[in-house]
Amino acid sequence: MILSIESSCDDSAIAITEIKTKKLLFHKKISQELEHSVYGGVVPELASRLHAEALPKILEECKPYFKDLKAVAVTTAPGLNVTLVEGVTMAKALCLALDIPLIAVNHLKGHIYSLFIEKEASFPQTVLLVSGGHTQVIEVKSLEEMEMVATTMDDSFGESFDKVSKMMNLGYPGGPVIEKLAQEGDENRYPMPLPLSQSPLIAFSYSGLKNAVRLVSLEADEKDFPDIAASFQKAAVGHLLQKLKKYFKTNPPQHFAIVGGASANLYLREKIETLLKPFNATLSLAELKYCSDNAAMIGRVGVEMYEKGRFTSLDEVKTEPRTSL
């Protein structure tokens, strides 16, 4: 079995995955959303302290599995340095105590493998990764062959939802709040600018759209919030659709997937499904419970890396706030 640890941001999670069957034997996550909601976003130092409290509590429940562990997989990048360190420190201690190897996992690869929890991986896939920190289109051929073909120039898709929610004092995390509020609103009431609509670039940008929402909300009352939320969501998703459509002209998709915390947005899922119909492309989605950060996806990558002998020396393992695939 492999024990996996995830602490890249504000979720403390540990999982146990059986190597041969890919079966998830244990998974527990403790969220910090309540503690950070007071500040309207994640406070890194607070997150680090909360990881230091939560991870040992979860690990205590994993002790019956220790005798069967073959490796420890841990998120090392990208993420918040002060929170990544909490998971890596625990992983190194376990590896030393149990005399087993360490597997350093890229968090973004974890999101891609969230599609394959408890099942075999299937490639190639054109992947849209949308989360609080990332908005990327990635061509994935295998664990080692991943090419990023588009990314955001500023804010991410998920981050823009958080910031719009904060503008209207609606709480954190903003994604679920804005999505729910948008269901009650008129998405055509406030015409929002479609970012980079005249640009030939296959890239994303949410800073201008975020500012447009700010200007509208300054003159709005609370009764207008559902319409603002709906109009914003329409433009935020419309931006993704427009750039994907442009990319598909030269790279028609056969197998498409959406991963990351913001992939739980049902409006986005519905619009992508419609976009893919003319191409007869398959659409893969992670289960909703595995869209946000979790240790199960880290363990799934860990299994793949274990089978390939991809281990990292305890002396060489290091955390990185930003990294490529």
Image: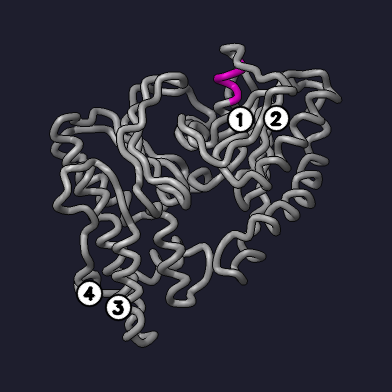
The answer to whether mark 3 and mark 4 are in CB contact below 8 A is: yes
In the image, which residues are magenta? 302-306
Tell which circle, 2 or 3, labels the residue nearer the N-terminal end. Answer: 2
Question: Which residue is at a point 62% across and 71% down the rendered structure image?
Answer: 38
**Residue count near mark 1 (Cα–Cα under 10 Å), binned few <14, some 14–19, many ≥20:** many
**Residue count near mark 4 (Cα–Cα under 10 Å), binned few <14, some 14–19, many ≥20:** some
- Mark 3 or 4: in front is 3
Tell which circle, 4 or 2, labels the residue nearer the N-terminal end. Answer: 2
Does residue 57 appear in the picture of this structure?
yes
- Mark 1 or 4: in front is 4
Question: Which residue is at a point 61% across and 30% down the rendered structure image?
Answer: 299
Q: Secondary structure at mark 2?
A: strand
Q: Label 1 to label 4, Cα distance in Å?
A: 44 Å
Tell which circle, 3 or 4, labels the residue nearer the N-terminal end. Answer: 4
- For disc 3, the marked residue is 216
The answer to whether mark 2 and mark 3 are in CB contact below 8 A is: no
Q: Position of residue 24 (x, y in %)?
A: 62, 32
Q: In the figure, residue 190 lies in which quadrant?
A: bottom left
Q: Of the residues shown, which amino acid type is indicated by label 4?
A: Tyr
Q: Secondary structure at mark 4?
A: loop
